[in-house]
Amino acid sequence: MISNCQVCDSENLIFADTGANGGYGPELLPGTGVFKPARFRIVVCEKCGFVHFFVIPEDLDKVKKSRRFRSINELR
Ligand SMILES: [Zn+2]
């Protein structure tokens, strides 16, 4: 997680945890389960509005174990 905005370095950050796989929306963290898929932690800078996306720490293993996610080295 971060304690400062990546754009303006402000420490005034707020966050919310939210689902990543909407019922009618895109599956943004695919392969992380049907009943309890991995969730995002959205961190917003109150000063500049920049939005930072993270997988919430307790769900990170679900993403790492998902067969839909591959190493970026496969693209190199
Ligand atoms: Zn900022």
Image: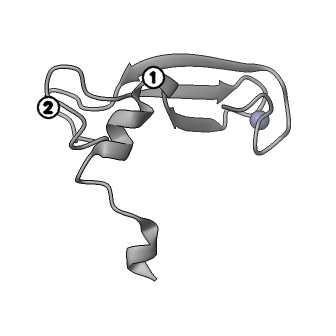
Q: Are marks 2 and 1 in contact (CB under 8 Å)?
A: no
Q: Name the amino acid, label 1.
A: Glu
Q: Nearer the viewer, residue 1 or 23?
A: 1
Q: Secondary structure at mark 2?
A: loop
In percent of width and height, residue 5 lies at 77, 36
Q: Name the amino acid, label 2.
A: Tyr
Disc 2 versus disc 1: nearer the observer: 1
Q: Secondary structure at mark 1?
A: helix
Mark 2 CB within 8 Å of ligand 1: no
Ligand 1 shows up in the quarter that is: top right
Q: Nearer the viewer, residue 22 or 1?
A: 1
Image height of 40 relative to 71, above or below: above
Q: Quadrant of residue 14?
A: top right
Give the alpha-carbon distance from disc 2 to disc 1, as whole Å. 25 Å
In percent of width and height, residue 27 lies at 23, 41
- Residue 38 lies left or right of residue 9; in this view the side is left
In percent of width and height, residue 52 lies at 60, 37
Q: Residues within 10 Å of mark 1 (few under 14, many from 20)?
A: few
Q: Residues within 10 Å of mark 2 (few under 14, many from 20)?
A: few
Q: Which residue is mark 1?
A: 58
Q: Given the current orientation, which residue lies at the most extreme bottom position?
A: 76
Q: Residue at x 19, y 31 (%)?
A: 33
Image height of 46 relative to 31, above or below: above
Image height of 15 relative to 23, above or below: above
Quadrant where the N terminus sits is top right
Q: Nearer the viewer, residue 27 or 58?
A: 58
- Residue 69 lies left or right of residue 9; in this view the side is left
> Nearer the N terminus, badge 2 or badge 1?
2
Q: Which residue is mark 2?
A: 24
